[in-house]
Structure formats: structure tokens, C-alpha cells
Amino acid sequence: MTAAPAPDAPPNPPLGAPLTRAERIGDAALGLLVERGMRGLTHRAVDERAGLPQGSTSNQARTRQALLETAVRRQVQLEAAVLAPHELPSVPSAGAPPRALVDALALALHRYLTDHRALLVSRYELALEATRRPELRAFFDTAGSVFHTPLVAMLRAAGSPAPERHALSLIAWCEGLMFSCAAGSFTAAVPSLAELRTGFDELLRGMLGGDSDDNGGNDSESRTGDGRSSGGRSGDDGVHGRVHGG
């Protein structure tokens, strides 16, 4: 475990081209959610935080729903820069998850937990608000498919017999860790990169079978004739519980 930074700063915008007005408004909205919560998110407050003339946010997003959608859209953009779905390696054939896949997942999650904790806080503010606004829920879920869809495809290519269910389990495990480290009982420390690698390795091995390490997993996980492992565990011990992360 490593010490966790306090989530007291607005989300970090990615480096690159100058921000558009919509992105500036989105960043300001997310920063307000982090510092003041949903009650602090107003059009006037966004104008002030973004350094824009009064009325600029209303011209860009006339209703509160439109402002929330702008915030969700920016949240997804920033999360894509942090989690980088394009970094996931291709899986050419079925079998044990390759080390490159475990490393990529662990690195992305560790990067989020250690360097972008404010982005987690704004994420949960928006997720909770979506439970009270059906129209925002639909927008929030559609925007989130940018991460769900490639994960399902990756698991299917890796040989998962139930890629949708396994994607849900992986996402739920990540969501549980993120919530615990951002707002739960583990805010003082986050798992190390090595610990996250071990966690993903265990999860993927349980889903796909085999072992992502080079030893093939034949020592402690070999099966006896009655379907039990040599360690005395039943054949479905690899199934892990779901943790709904919001």
C-alpha cells in the first residue's frame, strides 16, 4: 500500500491543444463538484471558476440537465486520458491472460488512484445524481460504454465463456477499489502497482482458467479426478463476488 494524496484539487486536464469553451466549462463544473458538491454547481459559479463572462455557461448549456451532460462528457474525456482503453493489448488467442494485459490494467488503475483522485470524487457526484435523474442516467450509461465495450471484446478474444458477465465483475472490482480509496475506508493508502497486478492476475485467472505467469499454474491449481484442486478448493472458488460501484 502507498500513501494516498488528498482529492482536494480539480481534475487535471490533459496536456495538448488549447481547451475549447465547452471543455473549460466542463473542467470548471467538475472542479466545483469536487470542492462544493452538487449544490455548488450553478451556471454562475461555473462562469466565475472558468474565468468566463457572465452568461457564457448559460449560452453553452441552457438547462441544468445540459450542464450536467457537459460535465459527464468532460468526465469521460478525462477518464479516457487516464485509463487509456487504447493501451489494452490485443489478445490473439484464447487461453491464460497475457502478462501485458495484467500490466496494462494494473497501470491504468494505479494511475487513476494515485494521480487523479479528484476525478474519482466528481465521478461519484455525477453517478449519484444520475440515480435521481433518469435522463442523466441514460446519458451517463451511454457515455460509459467507451470503457465497457472494448473490455467485453478483450475478454471474448481471451476466451471468456461469459464476456459480459466477466466484464461486469472486472468493472465492479475496479469500482469497489476506486470508491474505497476515494471515499471509503482506504482513503489513507492505495494498493501498490504490484498489488494491483496480483489482483488482476487472480481475477483473470479465475475467469479464463490457467495462469498468466510463465509457470503455467500447474503447481497449486492442478485438478484431481473429482474436479477439486490439489489445494482442496472447489472448482468454482475462482468466482468472485460483485461489488456495485455506482
Image (tube, rainbow, N blue to C red):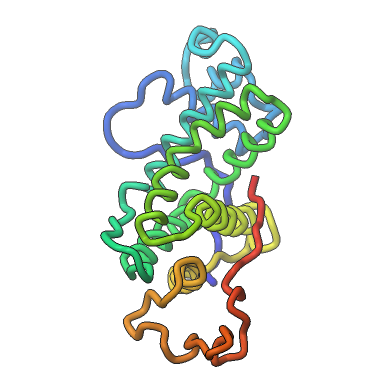
Give 235 or 57, whichever is nearer the viewer.
Answer: 235
Q: Residue placed at 41% from the left, 59% from the top? A: 105
In the image: residue 20, left or right of residue 239: left
Residue 89, x across and y down, in percent = 29, 57
Q: Is residue 150 above or below residue 156?
A: above
What residue occupies the far front of the structure in this picture?
225
Q: Is residue 64 above or below residue 219?
A: above
Q: Residue placed at 63% from the left, 59% from the top? A: 187
Residue 65 sits in quarter: top right
Q: Residue placed at 49% from the left, 32% from the top? A: 143
Residue 50, x across and y down, in percent = 48, 23
Residue 4, x across and y down, in percent = 55, 61
Which quadrant does the C terminus fall into? top right
Residue 217, x across and y down, in percent = 41, 84
Q: Residue placed at 60% from the left, 68% from the top? A: 239
Residue 94 sits in quarter: bottom left
Give 76 or 20, whichever is nearer the viewer.
Answer: 76
Number of numbered discs visible in the structure rendering: 0
Give 35 or 76, whichever is nearer the viewer.
Answer: 76
Q: Is residue 30 above or below residue 200?
A: above
Which quadrant does the N terminus fall into? bottom right
Residue 127 sits in quarter: top right
In the image: residue 72, left or right of residue 185: left
Q: Is residue 55 above or below residue 200?
A: above
